Amino acid sequence: MKDRNLCTKKFKYIFDEVFLDIHPRMWRSIQFKTSIIFIIFLGYLRMFTHYTAQFVMASLIGVPITQFHLGWWKITINSAPYEIWQEVAILLAGAFANLLVFLFMAAMSVWMKKLCGWFPKYWHSVICWHGMWMVADPSITLVMDCILNARNHYVKGEHLKWLDYFVLPDYFRKNAYYGNAGIGIYLTFFMFLVINLVNGYAFYRYMVFFFKDGRILDLYRRLSGEYNLFFVPQDREVSLNYLRWVLTRAK
């Protein structure tokens, strides 16, 4: 029961730390409004990064692009790859693009801290929110692809050729040698599962060791540490003169 309460308390403090600026009680503050704007912007940045990376990869490997439309809730890209490796390359480019952006932002925070000795605390939260969008990217893409695939069956004459979760199943279904979409479904979900594990691990490492200079790790140690690991000097164990000497040396 003690371990269970400790685990619950740990996740509660982590949740409060991450969502401190968007707590409902702060809805009138400028921090709350600014944070909501940033979260919405980062949500669109996730989508823009995903499909722009696919557009760039298709251009680099010579795949014809017939449509690239920027929408407020969906970016439509139509391309015509003729080899399976091209389809896989475009899929991976979109899936890992947000990870590269996240790693760049995290590396900038670490380097700025080492070179300049400071980094804006609020931007740690911005990197955290982008990381959450990054982890949710495969799931959001799955939902959007399913909606658009169902919509295409009812809209006459409209056909979106590129849907991340349906590209490989369509390839294996149309291929005369295989003729089975199940292979493409298995490969697609396996690939996105691996991608999500990599994204989740990168987000976990940042949140534990680098978010606000390791505040989460410090919080975890304080909550889970045993009593004998914490040394608190009792009265008169440290003299006033010794304390002044330590402070002088530290300055």
Image: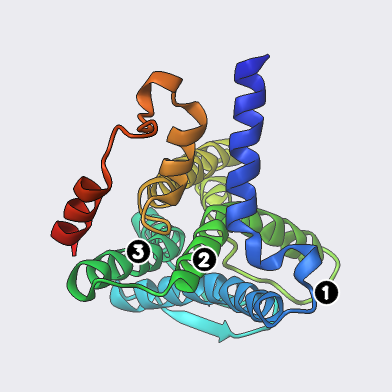
Q: How far separated are the C-alphas under marks 2 and 1?
A: 45 Å
Q: Nearer the viewer, residue 96 or 236?
A: 236
- Report x, y in % for residue 95: 45, 58
Question: How far across and down, in percent of the image, does residue 168 sit?
Answer: 52, 50
- Where is the C terminus found, in terms of image quarters? bottom left
Distance from the alpha carbon under mark 3 to that under mark 2 = 11 Å
Residue 215 is labelled as: none
Q: Looking at the image, how many numbered discs can be counted on the residues?
A: 3
Tell me the kind of residue under disc 3: Ala
Percent from the top left, x then y, of residue 18?
Answer: 58, 56
- In front: 39, or 90? 39
The residue wearing badge 2 is 125
Q: Amino acid at mark 2?
A: Ser
- Looking at the rendered image, the disc whose residue lies closer to the viewer, 3 or 2, is 2
Name the mark on residue 106.
3
Q: Quadrant of the N terminus?
A: top right
Q: Nearer the viewer, residue 32 or 168?
A: 32
Q: Which mark is residue 156?
A: 1
Compared across the picture, whether 135 is left or right of 101 comes to: right
Q: Is residue 198 above or below residue 32?
A: above
Residue at image position (18%, 58%) is 250
Please, what is the three-letter code of the amino acid marked with disc 1?
Lys
